[in-house]
Image (spheres, rainbow, N blue to C red):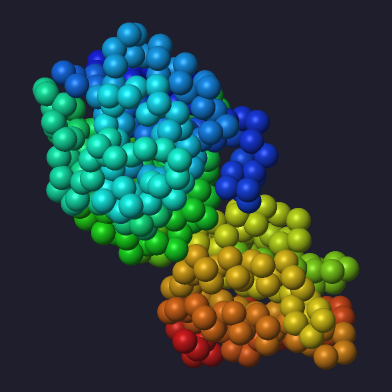
Amino acid sequence: MIKNITETIKYIGVDDTDIDLFESQYVVPNGVSYNSYVIFDEKVAIMDTVDPRKGAEWIENLQTALDGRKPDYLVVQHLEPDHAGNIAKVMALYPDMQVVASDKAVKMLPQFFYDTQFEGRVIGVKEGGTLSLGGRTLHFVMAPMVHWPEVMVSYDSKEKVLFSADGFGKFGALSHDEEWACEARRYYFNICGKYGGPVQTLLKKAATLDIAIICPLHGPILTENLGYYLGLYDTWSKYEPETEGVLVAYASIHGNTAEAARKFADMLRARGAEKVVVCDLARCDMAEAVEDAFRYSKLVVAAASYDSDVFPPMHDFLHHLAIKNYCKRRIGIIENGSWAPSAGRAMRNIIDRFKDVQVVEPMVTITSRLKPQDIPALEQLADDLLNDKCDRCVE
Ligand code: FEO
């Protein structure tokens, strides 16, 4: 797809609607876009390439957009293959073109392209580095760990365009028109979630720029109401809840833990909890469960015991949260076990790695099935979870 972003900046990216899993792990029912741009000035700069899966289509877009002109520069903001996969191909096509990348990226380039000759063809840039295209200057802002260490973003001070790399990206092909936040949030927490600190650093740098357009490497180009997107990124990267509510996530083998989880969700609703979301970790999209855990202010985990540990879908979920730096939430725990309940201890072992969380004590233990005598303990857990002054919540 080729379209004008401004009179002198063209979109030349591609949609990928036949990918099975993004990063070999995320379902993308509406595909994903690999964005790339060309800036036409006295000099011509390509902003990133695309995934090798769509290299031929991208080269065709590039050549159509160039309309016979030759690119002077390829700016590489991020070396992950979904954006850098065609660097060698386009370098071979345009032997006079220079590659512009962060110093860190310059060092890493031969790791991916060990049989490409980079000598004399690469310009390394640092924080505050610039590149004149004649009528405009690109300003480079280093953004390490948003989402890899070599990442930088680029600011066109003439047209007030921020090329934001993975920042402000979203799952979903551009051909699929949908609300931004849902798939942007799922993308953010699963791709960049661990790196809230670096995202905060980048946001502070971005606040010094006068930005009219954000051009990310995935998802739509943002041209209006930029404060909305920046505000969500600020909330997300501070690990603050976006929505007051409870995610009840359960991992149930035969349906008995599921029944307890659903009953507990009803208790929360009966107490006026504004938003209660229940998810079955054995069947739901794990990336969406992770997204919801970060979205809501409270989390309840309910799981069956399994092999003296916890039923694996719950282990997988909590492991995801731990590596994504889950923090700043209140957590309740429900375990189920028929002879030697072990799920609670196993969950607690992972939860203890989370920073700045409150765990409601004690956890609730049920044996095999929820029984009438279990109800008071669940009622107490529901009360404590929703009571911000609860003195049975330990940090
Ligand atoms: Fe879209 Fe970190 O690559």
Total tally of numbered discs in the picture: 0
| 238 or 307: nearer the viewer | 307
Whether residue 106 sits left or right of residue 178 in the image: it is left
Residue positioned most to the top: 68
Q: Is residue 394 above or below residue 132?
A: below
| 242 or 137: nearer the viewer | 137
Q: Is residue 102 above or below residue 280?
A: above
Name the residue located 52 percent from the left edge and 55 percent from the top edge: 190
The percent position of residue 353, horizontal first and vertical second, equals: 52, 81
Name the residue located 69 percent from the left edge and 70 percent from the top edge: 314
| 385 or 58: nearer the viewer | 58
Whether residue 391 sits left or right of residue 28 in the image: it is left
Name the residue located 40 percent from the left edge and 14 percent from the top edge: 63
Whether residue 207 sits left or right of residue 153 in the image: it is left
| 37 or 385: nearer the viewer | 37
Q: Is residue 126 visible?
A: yes
Whether residue 188 sits left or right of residue 262 in the image: it is left
The percent position of residue 87, horizontal first and vertical second, equals: 41, 34
Q: Is residue 38 above or below residue 141?
A: above
The percent position of residue 55, horizontal first and vertical second, equals: 51, 27
Which image quadrant is residue 36 in?
Answer: top left
Residue positioned most to the left: 135
Name the residue located 29 percent from the left edge and 16 percent from the top edge: 70
The percent position of residue 35, horizontal first and vertical second, equals: 43, 31
Q: Is residue 384 visible?
A: no
Which image quadrant is residue 154 in?
Answer: top left
